[in-house]
Amino acid sequence: MSETASERHDANTDTAIDRHLEREYEAGWVTDIESETLPPGLDEDVVRFISAKKNEPEWMTEWRLTAYRHWLTMDHPRWAHVHYPRIDFNAISYYSAPRSQEDRPKSLDEVDPELLRTYEKLGIPLHEQEMLAGVAVDAVFDSVSVATTFKEKLKEAGVVFCSISEALQDYPDLVRQYMGSVVPYRDNFFAALNSAVFSDGSFVYIPKGVRCPMELSTYFRINAENTGQFERTLIVAEEGSHVSYLEGCTAPMRDENQLHAAVVELVAHKDAKIKYSTVQNWYPGDAEGKGGIYNFVTKRGLCAGERSHISWTQVETGSAITWKYPSVVLRGDDSVGEFYSVALARGRQQADTGTKMIHLGKRTRSTIISKGISAVRAENSYRGLVRMAPSADGARNFTQCDSLLIGDRCGAHTFPYIESRNPTATVEHEATTSKVSDDQLFLCRQRGLDPEKAVSMIVNGFCKEVFRELPMEFAVEAGKLLEVSLEGAVG
Amino acid sequence: MTMSTPLEQRLSDFDRLARARAAELRDADGPLTDLRRAGEAAFTATSLPGPKTESWKYSRVGPLLEVGLLDAPRADASMPDLPDIDGLDAGRIVIVDGLPRQLPETSVPGVSVTRFSAADPADLAGLGDLADLEGRPFVALNGALIEDGVLIHVGRGVDAGTLELILAQNADGAPCGAHPRVRVVLESGASLALVERHIGTAAVFANSVIEVQVGDAARLAHMRLQLDAGAARSLTALDVAVARDGRYDLQQALLGSTFRRNEIRIRCTGPGAEVAVGGATLTRDRGHLDTQMCLEHAVPHCRSDQVFRALAGERSKTVLNGRIHIHPQAQQTSAELSSRNLLLSHDAEIDAKPELEIYADDVKCAHGATVGRLDDKALFYLRARGIEEASARRMLSFAFLAAVVDAFPLPTVGDHVRSALEAAFDRPAEASQ
């Protein structure tokens, strides 16, 4: 901290800040459940073991092996603005399933009560879901889905919502048709790794013309020590259908870094709409940055048909390192892609996140609203690509990316790539960086707000455009998360 | 493991030849020995940019690797025809293929313009201080293959008036590799207007490095004109440091050529420094123009403002990487960058990458970038008043560039730029293959 900067600080505020910054992670605990876990290490046998364990069809095993062989030829990417020690991929265990996997519970009553207690601590009222929120939860505990509700109601509408493992048994043709069609295994280092060893995840299929009767939701939770999680999510929306999918996470405290490399693929056909919302609050590590989750995720949607619509909304407050670029390929004419993001990094967190909008179809439109908040010693980067292909006549993009700095030892960065090859396309990009201004703080405090409330209010205002896009339940959760993460972090 | 692709082969040929050339020059006596050795060492330690080098994402080095582009320039090559800028009253420095050929007879006391080869070794001491070699193989190559250069020194408090710095190709159009080097030092309170002109359309490789030191409260108005299109392979590195309360103003008018890339690094090293950068660019046919701009704020209380306007026609490509880097101690910084781009044809390409890298919190930083085409409504307005479409487009395009062209600190240079850009805009497109 430079002297000139510290002189400007209000000494009283500093004490309050320090107190709040020392707060421990509130969702940190470990549930003791027996896991069936592979010893650390990765080779073709491990890939075969995972595939066999899940009783997968031959082609799936082959696909995994091809991905694994390709992964071996790839280099660990280093271009992101994040720093971490080299990951030893042979020190990770690639399979972990709750023991009760073999005799799957037929209903919630049969679910391990320890598990249910974990969910309750997380605030997922599984028993009360039906009455409360009308939300179906496919809870992923470590790698295997153990409880799925609302199956009946969704079945009536013809919606398929199950784990990828189940889908591979029940709808192999659908999975085969779409898996890897948006994120091929060659896409990047972590996507290749995921393709080889993905454990489980969700599969959603919305038939033609169906509006999914409820918001679908999955809670991910990393549990067993040393176990990387490799989810794979696939959502297919047929012509004229509509689905909103919520994803939220939290993880117990531990000392070793945990790798999380998920892949999410969305396919929206003609006139279909997919809305994908994420609230991510994984363990960010302690004050020195030790022990947090490495979150290296590949998320991509394909607007395959005319007038299709994919919208990503994310609130990222957790993880030691976030490396995530939910993207949209706008292939159908008049299709729409959206990205709304709040990324908050504090302590020693590092986030490199953003989006890609690839405009191929005529009159395609995309909107990017990104709000980055850096506090204490965190590094927060926005990295985005907007590409107008020669075929994207009349396409439009608007990008607004703002950064807010709280504290004079953090960093906020913006790396937008704009590539235009069509003179009728329009790209507009704006970015600003500023701090919570002394004037704003003074104004709030003068009216009797304490510094934490004032900052929280200012930050909430800063993020309003994104929160507005979240489903109601998530908006409340996201607001609370930011408040908890930021109270008092005034710079 | 994999078979060498032609590009890989050409890269390794270039690398081998360059090292051989550097080895030839290594032991030549004179004041430049240290620079050559440092350059050679850095060149050997860095690999040439390949397809995966991030900072070269939009520029392919292919055109630089052709046969003959590492040949030594000839000291007796014929001088090209160098047209004057109407009304410009300036001392003229001419560098042909990297070799200084003409210097002004300076009459202003306190101003000296000397060849490196004739300079006092003490005056060359700071050479290479600003042009960082790390990760910059071509800057290293310039050092390794340097034969001579020009030192411009303006003493404390002296107003040096205007100097014209011409970097030209030989008149014979013989391919060769030129490595021009210029160092400009303004002592505290000094001022200078520098008109830098790049002239020549032949397939000569010009790899220039210019280092500029703007002292306390000194002022440099730097105008950079690259107004020849054609086959030139032009690569420039411009490294500038601006000290306390210094002011550096860089206004550029650029046309694309077969390969043109300008790497510019400006550092505010003293509080109160101010920097203004402008770029009006036009690329046509298969022209290529890549601007790699890095503005670093290393100390508090500095301001920078950058404005870029680009037109890209036919099958040309314009690239702008505009990076603003705020160091942790650089509080109270204000930094802005605006990049507006117009595509004039269906086959042209514009790649813009404005970047912010910020490590201090009490700052105001913003950048904006747009890519699009001329406003239909504005075109309609003009056409409704009886103006032909082509004329209307021309009027609107030049109104678009005016934000930069009008900011040239010397009106005579501004007028010259305007007519040169108009001529380049009006000439018919080359027949496409």
Image (cartoon, rainbow, N blue to C red):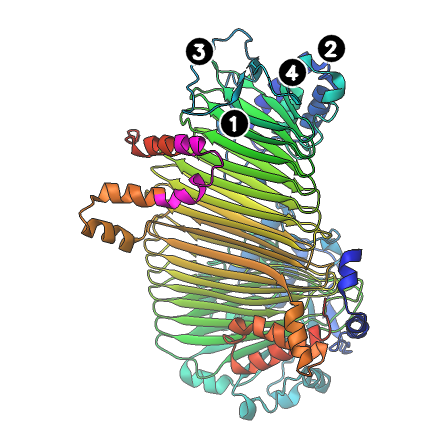
- x, y (%) of residue B417? 41, 32
- Can you identify the residue that label 4 sits on? B20
- Can you identify the residue that label 1 sits on? B196
Q: Earlier in the sequence, mark 4 or mark 1?
A: 4
**The one of A340 and A400 positioned closer to us in this rendering:** A400
Q: Residue furthest bottom?
A: A131
Crowding at mark 1 (Cα within 10 Å: few <14, some 14-19, many 20+): some
Q: Is residue B236 visible?
A: yes
Q: Which of marks 1 and 3 is nearer the N terminus?
A: 3
* Image quadrant in which the C terminus of chain A is located: bottom right
Crowding at mark 2 (Cα within 10 Å: few <14, some 14-19, many 20+): few
- Can you identify the residue that label 2 sits on? B29
Q: Which chain carries label 4?
A: B
Q: Which of pointers 3 and 4 indicates the residue nearer the eye?
A: 3
Q: Is residue B26 left or right of residue A361?
A: right
Q: In this view, does A414 lie above or below A218?
A: above
Q: Mark 3 lies on which chain?
A: B
Q: Which of marks 2 and 1 is nearer the N terminus?
A: 2
The residue shown at (55%, 43%) is B276
Report the predominant secondary structure element of the magenta stretch. Answer: helix
Q: How far apart are marks 3 and 4 (CA)?
A: 26 Å
